[in-house]
Image: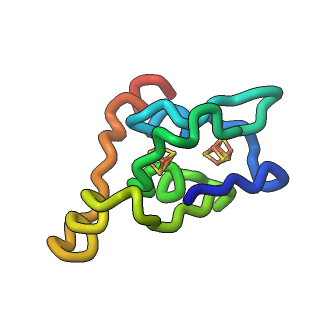
């Protein structure tokens, strides 16, 4: 499950950029869930949000993520190259 606290959102757009499934969009400089069912609960948006405005908790729909993170201990990896180029 993913939740965005829009009161803490500064509209930086980082979550939109790092999400691999285009779950998050910006509207009036606030992040919102445009396609929540596509969320694989990878945690990339939460990890990269500078304002801690996003909380991601693992649910039953993210078996692959649970195997990777909890069993294989593989942390989600974020390619920040695009962020550096874009910024
Ligand atoms: S990364 Fe955080 S502060 Fe930036 S747009 Fe997303 S929710 Fe808002
Ligand atoms: S947890 Fe992953 S898939 Fe879900 S919204 Fe955040 S970055 Fe996108």
Side of 73 where 65 appears, left or right? right
Q: For residue 16, what is the image quadrant?
A: top right
Side of 31 where 85 appears, left or right? left
The relative height of residue 87 versus residue 30 in the rendered view (above or below) is: above
Percent of width and height locating residue 46: 53, 57
Hey, which residue is sitting farthest left in the picture? 72
Q: Nearer the viewer, residue 56 or 30?
A: 56
Side of 79 where 17 appears, left or right? right
Hey, which residue is sitting farthest front in the picture? 60
The relative height of residue 71 versus residue 38 in the rendered view (above or below) is: below
Q: For residue 18, what is the image quadrant?
A: top left
Q: Quadrant of the N terminus?
A: bottom right
Q: Which residue is at 52% across, 41% downward?
A: 37
Q: Which residue is at 78% across, 31% downward?
A: 29
Side of 40 where 33 appears, left or right? right
Q: For residue 27, what is the image quadrant?
A: top right
Q: Nearer the viewer, residue 28 or 86?
A: 28
Q: Which residue is at 45% across, 66% downward?
A: 58
The relative height of residue 30 versus residue 50 in the rendered view (above or below) is: above
Ligand 1 positioned in quadrant: top right
């Amino acid at each position: 499950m993913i939740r965005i606290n829009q009161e803490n959102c500064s509209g930086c757009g980082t979550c939109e950029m790092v999400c691999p499934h285009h779950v998050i969009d910006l509207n009036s400089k606030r992040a919102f869930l445009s396609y929540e069912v596509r969320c694989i609960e990878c945690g990339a948006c939460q990890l990269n949000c500078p304002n801690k405005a996003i909380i991601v908790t693992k649910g039953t729909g993210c078996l692959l993520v649970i195997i990777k993170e909890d069993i294989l201990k593989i942390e989600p990896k974020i390619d920040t190259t695009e962020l550096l180029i874009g910024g």
